[in-house]
Image (spheres, grey):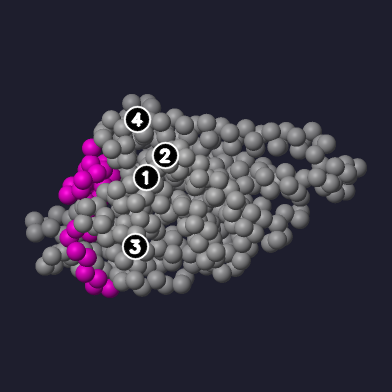
Amino acid sequence: MTDQEELTSVLDAVRDIVPTLRANGADAEAQRWIPDENIELLDKAGVFRTAVPRAHGGLDLGVADQFRVIAEVARGCPSTGWLTMVWLTSTWCASLYPDRAQEEVFAGGNTRVSIVFAPTGTLVPADGGYRLSGTWRYNSGVRGSDWDLLAAMVERPDGTTEELVAMVPVSELDVTDDWHVSAGAATGSCTTTARDVFVPAHRVVSLEEVMVSATGDRSNTGATGRNYGLLAYVLSGVAGAFVGIARGAYELFLDRLPGRGITYTDWTDQKLHPLTQIQVATAANKIDAAEALSTRWLTLLQNRADAGEQPTDEEKAIVRGQTAFAAQLAKEAVEILFNASGGSVIRRDVHIQRFHRDIQGFSLHALAQIDVNLEVQGRVLVGMEPGTYFL
């Protein structure tokens, strides 16, 4: 099959399971982790092959296609969509490791990888590699992952420190069941601990090199069309999840609308009220605007990767602002629809309330916070430095 045919096959399969993902939402939230059925259905649909390099049996879809897959999953279940974003973007990160590590992680052509960027661990050089110790919080997806990418600091002989990212089998880590939250509950973003775990040298890379796809000892370097700027690529997936959540909430609102009146008024059909019509139109336009804006940075990232180039720091700063702005538009759309849904919307058996709570929680993630990202974008727009190396 061609790339387009493979993408269509995955998207069609995901669309078919959206009703099941949605129906499983309440149980997923109650157990603070998505049901095994969700993972099995995504696996069968080919979702977990989309970011795996073709050389290892994957579909190797580009960033724009991954955006569409993530959004489609999130349309069914926000938390499952968020996890899909984590698993796909982390799997791509694994493709930046040396060939030897890639052969291990992609052995089956299908894998799930999670990641934590906060360097809350330490690496101590050892014969043939490092000893890893530390604790990482908010490790989304680790409960269903095969591998975990964990940022940690190492002290060099000259006293300087460097941030590295270690690839570790989840089976060698301790995962604490401590994820008790009011939003994104089904992501199972548990605390993970490494206790003097040996990590071979080929499974450790420099964060500085990873950020610009400059890692060595691998055959998939250069103008392969997949060596993206790391943070901009990850943020694209984040925005995809937000857009998908908003589209799901929009559908759920319209599904509940027929026959609903406006309590304590003479309006027996809410859809006839001009305010409802305005609210629906506003929400639809915000979602469409978020998706339309995404084409700008998705095109930029792909063009750069096709040419074997990295986006400039200015371009990366703008992507940070644009992805956060798109996420904000999606969040605002969900807020409009939630507020227009009447008092019954707070019932646990009404799906849209979960979409609302999840998108509110995800918007607090450090990579999605609107003001922080707009500041970074705004600084370069007025001719200043971005003010952060995390681009």
**Horizontal placement of 203 versus 113: left or right?**
left
Count neighbours of disc 3 (C-alpha within 10 A) and say few if under 14, some if 14 to 19, many if 20 or more: many
Residue 68 in view in this figure: no
Count neighbours of disc 4 (C-alpha within 10 A) and say few if under 14, some if 14 to 19, many if 20 or more: some
**Horizontal placement of 182 versus 279: left or right?**
left
Look at the numbered discs 2 and 3 and tell me whether their residues touch, using CB distance below 8 Å: no
Is residue 377 shown above or below 251?
A: above
Count neighbours of disc 2 (C-alpha within 10 A) and say few if under 14, some if 14 to 19, many if 20 or more: few
Q: Nearer the viewer, residue 223 or 268?
A: 223
User: For the residue labelled by badge 1, is the local secondary structure a helix, a strand or a loop?
Assistant: loop
The amino acid at mark 4 is Asn
Residue shown at 37% from the left, 64% from the top: 146
The mark lying in front, picked from 2 and 1, is 2
Q: Nearer the viewer, residue 314 or 148?
A: 148
Mark number displayed over residue 283:
none
User: For the residue labelled by badge 2, is the local secondary structure a helix, a strand or a loop?
Assistant: helix
Residue 323 location (% of width, % of height):
46, 38
For disc 2, the marked residue is 3
Q: Nearer the viewer, residue 135 or 199?
A: 199
For disc 1, the marked residue is 60
**Magenta-drawn segment:** 195-222
For disc 3, the marked residue is 147
User: For the residue labelled by badge 4, is the local secondary structure a helix, a strand or a loop?
Assistant: helix
For disc 4, the marked residue is 303
Q: CA distance from mark 3 to mark 1?
A: 19 Å
The amino acid at mark 3 is Trp
The amino acid at mark 2 is Asp
Q: CA distance from mark 3 to mark 4?
A: 30 Å
The mark lying in front, picked from 3 and 1, is 1
Residue 288 in view in this figure: yes
- Upstream in sequence: badge 2 or badge 3: 2
Look at the numbered discs 3 and 1 and tell me whether their residues touch, using CB distance below 8 Å: no
